[in-house]
Amino acid sequence: LIINFNINLRKRIEMLIFVLNAGSSSLKYQLIDIKSKELKASGLVERIGIDGILKHEIGENKKLTFELPIPTHKEAIELVLRILTNNETKVINSIDEIKAIGHRVVHGGEYFKGSAIVDDEVIRKIEELIPLAPLHNPANILGVKICKDLMPKVPNVVTFDTAFHQTMPMENFLYAVPYADYTEHHLRKYGFHGTSHYYVSQEAIKLLNKKDSKVIVCHLGNGSSVCAVKDGKSISTSMGLTPLEGLVMGTRSGDIDAGVIPYLMEKKGLNHIQILDYLNKKSGILGVSGVSSDLREVIKAANDGDKRSKIAITMLCDRIKKYLCSYAGLMHGVDAICFTAGIGENSDLIREKVCEGLEFMGIEIDKDKNSKREKGNREINTKNSKTKIFVIPTNEELVIATDTYNLLKK
Ligand code: AMP
């Protein structure tokens, strides 16, 4: 009886971590029990300061939508905490059950090579980095400050999108411009999606069961990037000083001749803010196809015969292929290619087109395995393929929650 009682008691001990990703007008959150890895609740608040919509999920099944005015981020977080503890929707009795909060922060510059427990100095450094991420870091800091205000006894941890790429060697992060602009103005490649690249490459290394590993991760979503991971460390990645460099994305051009910028500014009479808006919000798949930034709609249009949509899809896949081949060259080979995020996890068409013609490098996709819709990590290469091809659903929130727990445990 005593043994049974102890087992039951242990089962009920939870360690709840609240994971928060605060954007300029949105807020994503998850409540995770780090002991069991159970997702208690998750959601997304959108259109903060405009009108307000909250999509909340309890566990992985029960979905609720609330439409109500949400004027500020503070009110958004207060609302989420009320829903987590409210009678009908509650998953916890009180916010005191939340033991720590993990925040996603976009830019950690060269200061942060891993996650950090929040103190005044950490906040000061994130603020200092605002010029490198003017759209993201201010909202991220706001999320931290509101949580400190609303839950003063709960510790906060920050996890950075850039941190995983801090292992890149200098030759891979410098731009070939005068060196003084690196030392004086911090001009260099930082890379983003680091939490996702870290999670997916770790999963791949476990699947490979190999000590020395060469893995390429393709994080393909609305924003996309590729990362070369050698022995678990990022050695090169496609995004740069900002998330504009690299692949063709939903609305971002990716790699482009820098000469395009003054040329277009003059031709179209654009200032520097307008040209950035053009390259960040009007380009990529949307710009080329003229249909949408949502790849599902562009694929549908291509199937209906739309020429520009077909070209946009080919440009997207060819750019990924270019990075795959160059990173395989950089690492002197590749053991595994991983596909993740919205497009990488869901589009068999894109995975097939990316791998098409790469048999000469030992990359052979199995079309049947590729077209099956299954949950979880899976292998989609042929038996003879020298390189493994994996589909690995990313889980950035779990990395943030785990880092938060591990740092505070110390
Ligand atoms: P994410 O930013 O990771 O949420 O990914 C969003 C992107 O995934 C959107 O551009 C969607 O068009 C794309 N996506 C989701 N499902 C599919 C699918 N079945 N086929 C193609 N693209 C998809």
Image (cartoon, helix red, strand yellow):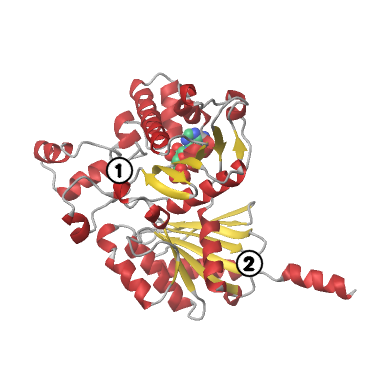
Q: Residue at x 18, y 47 (%)?
A: 177
Q: Nearer the viewer, residue 335 or 38?
A: 335
Q: Quadrant of the N terminus?
A: bottom right
Left-right relation of 145 to 131: right
Q: Amino acid at mark 2?
A: Lys
Q: Residue at x 32, y 69 (%)?
A: 125
Helix, strand or loop for disc 1: loop
Left-right relation of 127 to 61: left
Does 36 appear above or below 331? below
Q: CA distance from mark 2 to mark 1?
A: 42 Å
Task: Looking at the image, tell me whether mark 2 or mark 1 is earlier in sequence order.
Answer: 2
The residue at the far right in this view is 1
| Discs 2, 1 touching: Cβ within 8 Å | no
Q: Residue at x 49, y 41 (%)?
A: 215
Q: Residue at x 58, y 77 (%)?
A: 96
Q: Position of residue 399 (x, y in %)?
A: 53, 58
Q: Position of residue 234 (x, y in %)?
A: 42, 49
Left-right relation of 55 to 280: right
Helix, strand or loop for disc 2: loop
Q: Which residue is mark 1?
A: 245
Q: Nearer the viewer, residue 279 or 393?
A: 393
The residue at the far bottom in this view is 153
Q: Which residue is mark 2?
A: 90
Local packing at callout 2 (Cα closer than 10 Å; few below 14, some 14-19, many 20+) is some
Does 272 appear above or below 104? above
Q: Does the numbered disc 2 mark a residue whose Cβ is under 8 Å from ligand 1?
A: no
Mark sitting on residue 223: none
Q: Amino acid at mark 1?
A: Glu
Q: Nearer the viewer, residue 129 or 313?
A: 129
Rendering quarter of residue 299: top left
